[in-house]
Amino acid sequence: MFGLGMQELIVIFVIALLIFGPKKLPELGRSLGRGLAEFKRASEELKEGLAAELSAEEERASAVAHEAQQPAKAEPPPTPGEEEKPKGTHETRNV
């Protein structure tokens, strides 16, 4: 735990007890515990978010690599008359 032994922790506790007093010390301990718990929760959420983003990025990369490995189907070139034929009654061509 941060490289502190039992003796160092006792010294820190005694100094904190002298500075803050016995009435204020439990309140400080609770707020410190809540702060550490919130920090731990936020760091876990960050780790989970990063892991999800990395896995999504890997999936996208593998999908792109898979598409690159598949041969592309070549479409036949359009015949000369196809470009000028209207495709439907609702489409008009601006010339």
Image (tube, rainbow, N blue to C red):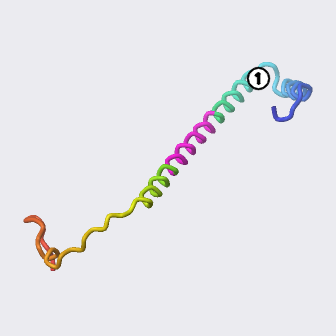
Position of residue 6 in the picture relative to residue 35 (left or right)? right
Viewer-closest of 77 and 40: 77
The residue at the far top in this view is 23
Image quadrant holding the C terminus, namely: bottom left
**Image x and y of residue 50, in percent:** 57, 45
Q: Quadrant of residue 14?
A: top right
Viewer-closest of 28 and 47: 47
The mark tally for this picture is 1
Q: Give the residues in magenta.
A: 41-57
Q: Quadrant of residue 42?
A: top right
In this rendering, the answer to whether 68 lies above or below 34 is below
Residue shown at 57% from the left, 39% from the top: 48
**Image x and y of residue 65, in percent:** 47, 57
- Provide the residue designation for mark 1: 24
Position of residue 66 in the picture relative to residue 28 (left or right)? left
Q: Quadrant of residue 49?
A: top right
Image quadrant holding the N terminus, namely: top right
In this rendering, the answer to whether 20 lies above or below 81 is above
In this rendering, the answer to whether 86 lies above or below 56 is below
Dominant secondary-structure state across the stretch colored magenta: helix
The residue at the far left in this view is 89
